[in-house]
Image (cartoon, rainbow, N blue to C red):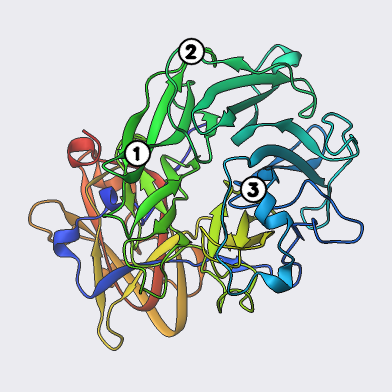
């Protein structure tokens, strides 16, 4: 059965920006779960104490739903040993500068949930810490680790795959992979045969549904700046050399980590952007969560780059909200037709004392970003790139405010003249929010034949999120 194709308006390749008028792109900021957040937090100073949870730091949450086991899994990195955090009670931290030690030890821990809200940190009995194995530690000396449930794997012993940086010290580390049949008991890490990137970040990987290769998004350094890089593997053992794929703009906008995921026909990224370079700036040493996209994973564009996808909480350390300082997100999980993003939020500066908590927020499906009027009171115009149409089904995802309107027409790609029977006067009106069919009074879209055409939207008091239908964007300027 023939399938429709969905295009998000955040994809600049489907819009002819030269003819846009009074429009601008905005992020649909994630709605935080104010009822349940934070879902869990560091418990070093709790009673009883989880003595291995001395500092979550960035924690790099790795969350997915395991359909076979019917549970949500969360894997997270932390410091198991950190002398300054351990010896400085919470009430004595304000006014002190955190001093990291070379003796810090990283670890990799596990939590699970049956409903996505209530999380348990089980005693796994795997790793001895302070003369006890009653903890949820999977590995010691593992930095920025990631677990992937490989549903294409035919060997049950390799169903769960782990990639990590084994880190004994700043100068003694190596990349490694491991396998498990249950997501908890992993075999001995297997070192990469080639290449040893710095990789002091969230080393996120997945199996690309397009190329079938394993893709790792890690981090390298160039000229003192943090930069996102990509490695590839066919067999999960042999990996390519890291290649730069995106960067920010100078010291005040550095890509600290960037998990990515396939969504419809593009890739979306969740870059945590680190800000340094100006110690007097109010946001110095903080981390913001942005959104970017790519059609090939090699070239990335930020979506509404001045806006944050997850907005940091209000205030400053130590009295600010739990996520007022730094944010690091996992790739999303769909729950009840909403897209949830689980993240770690810290309440202080990146290099200072901060306590970090696990939380979540959501957007409605497909509503990542939207076109909206730049100035209210005037109509806005968005002209799409040229599409080939091969069926009559065509829909738009939009939000309409009271008194808002969306009109549309199909126009010639060169002259931009309306096709007869496909003008503004011929279109069936959009009367509400959500997905709406785009139809014409006396014509069917298939009456257009095989020639490519553009769609012109004229709107006010509305937000345009996505298109869906029997159409394909013309490749000439889309992805060469």
Q: What mark, if any, has residue 366 been given in the picture?
A: none
Determine whether the residue tagged by mark 3 lies in a helix, strand or loop: strand
Q: Position of residue 414 (x, y in %)?
A: 9, 52
Q: Residues within 10 Å of mark 1 (few under 14, many from 20)?
A: some
Q: Is residue 392 visible?
A: no
Kindly report the distance in space between the C-alpha atoms of the residues bearing marks 1 and 3.
Answer: 31 Å
Residue visible at 80% across and 57% down in the picture: 43
Circle 2 sits on which residue? 238
67 or 190: nearer the viewer? 190
Circle 1 sits on which residue? 221
**Label 1 vs 2, first from the N-terminus:** 1
Mark 1 vs 2: CB contact within 8 A: no
Determine whether the residue tagged by mark 2 lies in a helix, strand or loop: loop
Residue visible at 47% across and 50% down in the picture: 270
Q: Position of residue 26 (x, y in %)?
A: 38, 68
Kindly report the distance in space between the C-alpha atoms of the residues bearing marks 1 and 2.
Answer: 22 Å
187, above or below 5, in the image: above
Residue visible at 71% across and 16% down in the picture: 188
Horizontal placement of 24 versus 69: left or right? left
332 or 326: nearer the viewer? 326
Q: Quadrant of the C terminus?
A: top left
431, above or below 226, in the image: below
Residue visible at 76% across and 67% down in the picture: 36
Horizontal placement of 389 versus 116: left or right? left
139, above or below 73, in the image: above
Q: Position of residue 339 (x, y in %)?
A: 60, 55
Circle 3 sits on which residue? 333
Mark 1 vs 3: CB contact within 8 A: no
């Amino acid at each position: 059965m023939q399938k429709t194709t969905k295009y998000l308006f955040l994809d600049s390749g489907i819009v002819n920006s030269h003819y846009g008028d009074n429009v601008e792109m905005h992020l649909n900021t994630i709605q935080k779960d104010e009822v349940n957040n934070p879902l869990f937090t560091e418990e070093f100073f709790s009673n009883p104490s989880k003595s291995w949870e001395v500092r979550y730091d960035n924690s790099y949450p790795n969350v997915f739903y395991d359909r076979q086991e019917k549970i949500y899994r969360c894997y997270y990195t932390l410091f198991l040993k950190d002398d300054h955090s351990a010896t400085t009670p919470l009430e004595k931290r304000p006014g002190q500068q955190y001093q990291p030690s070379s003796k810090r030890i990283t670890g990799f821990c596990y939590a699970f949930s049956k409903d996505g809200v209530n999380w348990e940190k089980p005693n796994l009995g795997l790793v001895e810490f302070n003369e006890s194995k009653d903890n949820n530690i999977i590995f010691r000396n593992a930095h920025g680790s990631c677990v992937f449930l490989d549903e294409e794997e035919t060997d049950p012993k390799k169903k769960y795959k782990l990639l990590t940086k084994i880190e004994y010290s700043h100068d003694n580390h190596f990349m490694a992979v491991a396998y498990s049949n249950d997501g908890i008991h992993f075999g001995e890490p297997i070192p990469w045969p080639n290449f040893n990137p710095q990789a002091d970040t969230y080393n996120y990987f997945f199996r690309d549904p397009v190329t079938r290769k394993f893709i790792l998004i890690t981090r390298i350094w160039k000229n003192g700046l943090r930069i996102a890089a990509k490695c590839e593997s066919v067999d999960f053992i042999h990996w390519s050399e890291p290649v730069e794929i995106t960067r920010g703009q100078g010291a005040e906008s550095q890509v600290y980590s960037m998990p990515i995921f396939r969504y419809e026909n593009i890739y979306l990224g969740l870059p945590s952007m680190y800000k340094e370079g100006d110690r007097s700036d109010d946001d110095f040493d903080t981390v913001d969560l942005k959104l970017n996209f790519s059609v090939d994973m090699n070239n990335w564009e930020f979506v509404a780059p001045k806006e944050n996808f997850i907005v940091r909480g209000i205030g400053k350390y130590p009295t600010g909200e739990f996520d007022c300082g730094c944010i690091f997100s996992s790739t999303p999980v769909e729950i009840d037709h909403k897209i949830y993003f689980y993240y770690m939020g810290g309440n202080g500066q990146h290099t200072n004392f901060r306590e970090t908590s696990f939380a979540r927020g959501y957007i409605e499906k497909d509503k990542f970003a939207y076109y909206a009027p730049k100035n209210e009171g005037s109509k806005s115009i968005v002209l799409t790139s040229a599409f080939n149409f091969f069926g009559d089904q065509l829909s738009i995802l939009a939000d309409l405010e009271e008194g808002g309107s969306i009109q549309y027409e199909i126009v010639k790609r060169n002259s931009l003249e309306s096709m007869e029977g496909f003008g503004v006067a011929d279109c069936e009106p959009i009367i509400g929010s959500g997905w709406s069919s785009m139809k014409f009074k006396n014509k069917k879209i298939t009456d257009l034949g095989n020639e490519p055409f553009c769609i012109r939207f004229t709107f006010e008091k509305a937000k345009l999120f996505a298109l869906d239908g029997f159409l394909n964007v013309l490749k000439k300027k889309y992805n060469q």
